[in-house]
Amino acid sequence: MVDISEVNRMRWAARRGMLELDLLLGPFVNHHFVTLNEADRATFERLMTCQDQDLYAYLMRREAPDDPSFKPMIDKIRAATGAPQG
């Protein structure tokens, strides 16, 4: 079971300086974060340390992440939030 303090911390981390990111990350944390396994939660937490512009580029598939372990998590976020494909 995921501790509520971890969920709250990730809700805070998902609040970004870009509305576009807030619209993707907020709902993902609220509806899907608790369903992630421990490794995926750790990856999500590391992903939240990325700069907004980089994170947005990854989620919009404009750039590949520097860390290849981010790709599966980015795909999960995109699939869960209905981010545009392609």
Image: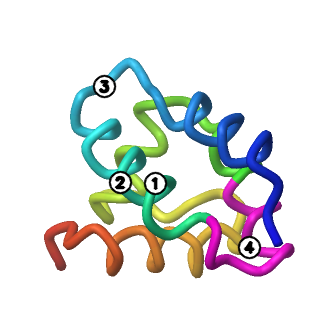
Q: Can residue 39 be found in the magenta stretch?
A: yes
CB-based contact (under 8 Å), mark 1 and mark 2: yes
Which region is colored magenta? 34-44
Question: Residue 35, how many percent across, how many down?
Answer: 62, 78
Q: Amino acid at mark 1?
A: Asn
Q: Amino acid at mark 3?
A: Met
- Indicate the quadrant where residue 31 lies: bottom left
- Asked where in the image residue 68 lies, by quadrant, the reply is bottom right
Circle 4 residue: 40
Secondary structure that dominates the magenta span = helix
Q: Which one is nearer the viewer's eye here, 38 or 52?
A: 38
Q: Nearer the viewer, mark 4 or mark 1?
A: 1
Q: CA distance from mark 1 to mark 3?
A: 18 Å
Indicate the quadrant where residue 63 lies.
bottom left
**Which secondary structure lies at badge 2?**
helix
* Element under disc 1: helix
Which residue is denoted by mark 1 in the rendering?
30
Q: Residue at x 67, y 77 (%)?
A: 36
Task: For label 2, count other residues whose C-alpha is less than 10 Å away and answer few (under 14), some (14-19) or many (20+).
Answer: some
Instruction: Give the crowd class for mark 3: few <14, some 14-19, many >=20 residues within 10 Å.
Output: few
Tag shown at residue 18: 3
Q: Residue furthest top?
A: 17
